[in-house]
Amino acid sequence: MKESAPTHLSLGLLLRLIHQHYAQDVDAALEEAGFRDIRPPHANVFTFARPEGIQVSELTRLAHVRKQTMTQAVEELERLGYVERRPDPNDRRARLVFLTERGKGVRPVAMAAGRLVDQRWSDIAGLDEIEALKRALQNLLEKLRGGDKSGDVPSDDAGV
């Protein structure tokens, strides 16, 4: 007897599976644009990097990952030429992470891919359904953050 898939998946699993589809489309666009060496852990750096630079400890806090994980991602991206680290003028012990010109080229590709995914999903599910889902997730995020609408959430144009 063939078992059928469960009809009621947990929210966490649904979000993970949907995110996998989204990430695959963005990764394919990045690869097609010549950014074949970017891996999923690198997305946190591109998402939260700032034009004025950012410390690894701040990237770690914003991305909610371990410092070791973020340090490794930054080191890999530095070796690949996507970021550079420079001394922090406000803290002689610290260094700031900056996107290089190559690193700045990742964002427009990822943003365009994300817009295409949004459009394709709206075509599949309907614009109203996708907009309702976005509103529901935004409301949940705000409530989880204690009503703070700005929080540490980057804008849609911030990253991968």
Image: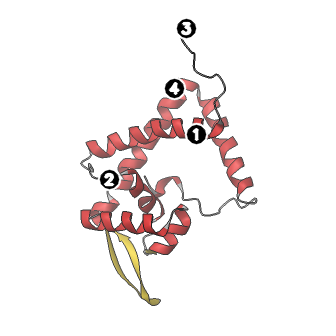
Who's the residue at 32% across and 61% down the image?
103
Counting other residues with Cα less than 10 Å from the Cα at mark 2, is it few (<14), some (14-19), or many (20 or more)?
Answer: some
Q: Earlier in the sequence, mark 1 or mark 2?
A: 1
Q: Earlier in the sequence, mark 2 or mark 4?
A: 2
Of the image marks 4 and 1, the number of the one nearer the N terminus: 1
SS for callout 4: helix
Q: Is residue 8 left or right of 46 when viewed as pictured?
A: right
Task: Say which of marks 3 and 2 sits in front.
Answer: 3
Q: Which comes sooner in the sequence, label 3 or label 4?
A: 3
Considering only vertical position in the picture, is 22 above or below 83?
above
Residue 81 falls in which quadrant of the image? bottom left
Residue 111, placed above or below residue 57: above
Quick one: label 3 or label 2, which is nearer the N terminus?
Answer: 3
Amino acid tagged 4: Asp
Q: Residue furthest bottom?
A: 92
- Please name which of the two marks, 3 or 4, marks the residue nearer to the observer: 3
Say if 51 sits above or below 14 in the image: below
Which numbered dot is residue 1? 3
**Residue assigned mark 2:** 38
Q: In the image, what residue type sits under mark 3?
A: Met
- Mark 4 lies on residue: 123
Residue that carries the numbered disc 1 in the rendered image = 15
- State how far apart marks 2 and 4 are (Cα): 29 Å
State the SS at label 1: helix
Name the spot of residue 95 as percent of width and height, x first. Answer: 40, 81
**Amino acid type at mark 1:** Leu
Q: Residue at x 59, y 26 (%)?
A: 126
Q: Is residue 95 left or right of residue 12?
A: left
